[in-house]
Image (cartoon, coloured by chain):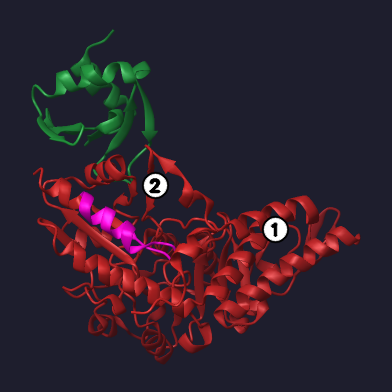
Amino acid sequence: MKDKYIRAAQELCDVEGAYMVILNKNIINTAIEKLRKFLEIITYDDGVMIRGWYRGKYFSLLPEGILIVKHLSGWSELDEVLNNIFGEE
Amino acid sequence: MLLMYDVYKIREDFPILKKKLRGKNIVYLDNAATSQKPIQVIEAISRYYKEYNANIHRSAYLLAREATQIYDEAHREVARFIGCNEDEVIFVRNTTEALNLIAYSWALSNLREGDEIILTIMDHHSNIIPWYLICSIKKCVIKFTDITEDGYLNLSHLESLLSLKTRIISVPHVSNVLGTINDIEYIAKLAHEYDALMVVDGAQSVPHMPVNVNKLDVDFLAFSGHKMLGPTGIGVLYGKRDLLQSLNPFMGGGDMIKSVECSIGGGCTISFESPPRRYEAGTPNIAGAVGLMKAVRYLKKIGMDNIRRHEIDLTKYTLDKLSEVSGIEIYGPRDPTHKGGVIAFNLRGFEPHELAILLDQLNNVMVRSGLHCAQPLHIRLGIKASVRASFYLYNTKEEVDIFVETLKTLSRKI
């Protein structure tokens, strides 16, 4: 999974175990398709935001491939969570 | 309110404000985090390295003497800016280091078990953690002053916390979240009635309004260069001369000693330089000091009263406009004359980080989201986090319009 994103910030000023990554362009559409199945989708102008709770974590998939996941203990848990959603490749 | 300077002319001095992202202008509203830099400051730093670079207070050759003169002049310029003597200005890295310097130089030597330090629930972590660390060592007690429901410091509560055990009162001059301007002059009087030290975190005030340490009668004042048009890595600790002369240094090294005599096989006899050098161990951030001096001159040329007036005008305009946004909750005082150019808020239906990213993505509106290094305040307010817009001398009403219109667009989506 690690090759699918870059770490954008180690933490977002210690808010609720929030971790932010920038998804690689080639996975953004896949992420939208996967996440929209179980999260709320909000459209505006030429973009979409998909967000909500899933399995105890809060997800925000924002424009430009920004993905924030909250209530994590660290990067390794983020990897685990994303692997569960997108599957190991 | 009549502007005393041409904000559009000022903006010409800031190269980064001409930058375009996503084909649009940027709207930089994160000035409480750091300010942008005018070309005059950028060029002063560049010129220093091109024409004057040498180590200071050490070498006899002309270039080194010139560098020393510039560095010492920076102390004088900052001293004039805040109304003190040049030997009362210590250059440090930032506000955080300045506050740590007081904690480790004064408090570590002077506090005793059971002594009390009064802080506020609106403090930035940098005015909490150093005292917490010292209190852990010295077994002292920290007491936090509450705020009122409308975001002012509760002075009655502060007075009720005072006792003969109070040794320090340390407060922010301006809250970095609520924007509240605290009555430092009054609190300093209270502190001195109890023979306590008055320490002020001036990170959000010195860049934005006239601050005179003599008028306020504070014992220490800390602030950062990078929030006032200067470079990162340079900050200031003001301390009253008699206090600075009585303290042990925070760090040891070169340039802060008068003599070091050591015997082979045993002991050293060391005498320290007078302030400020006693507290500026090692090669300092000379270029940073040069940049800060230029920044101070830039601010003085515009006039701190004018900058304050501009920010009041902009804050009032923003608060009025924000009242038209449905689902918005604003924290802190609503009277723009009682607050700095800082507005913290939440918009119903959005997590703060989501909102900040969407503001950026839609219209390059740059705001801070999160706890703003003030978690106790957010807990007190009963919120998880917030979004913060903060202004400076170069922000315009047109930028506020873009900011508010973007919020309106988003609020309609929920």
Query: Closer to the observer: label 2 or label 1?
Result: 2
From the viewer's side, name the closer residue of B57 and B107. B57
Which amino acid is tagged 1?
Answer: Ile
Residue B183: assigned label: none
**Does residue B403 belong to the magenta stretch?**
yes
Cα–Cα gap, marks 2 and 1: 34 Å
Residue B37 percent across, percent down from the top left:
54, 56
Tell me which chain appears red. Answer: B
Residue indicated by mark 1: B286
Disc on the earlier residue, 2 or 1: 2
Which amino acid is tagged 2?
Answer: Asn
What are the residue bounds of the magenta stretch?
A: B390-406
Q: Secondary structure at mark 2?
A: strand
Q: Secondary structure at mark 1?
A: helix
Position of B274 with respect to B147 (left or right) is: right
Residue A43 percent across, percent down from the top left:
14, 34
**Does residue B30 belong to the magenta stretch?**
no
Q: Is residue B28 visible?
A: yes
Chain for mark 2?
B
Residue indicated by mark 2: B25
Residue B68 percent across, percent down from the top left:
78, 64
Tag 2: Cα neighbours inside 10 Å, few (<14), some, or many (≥20)? Answer: some
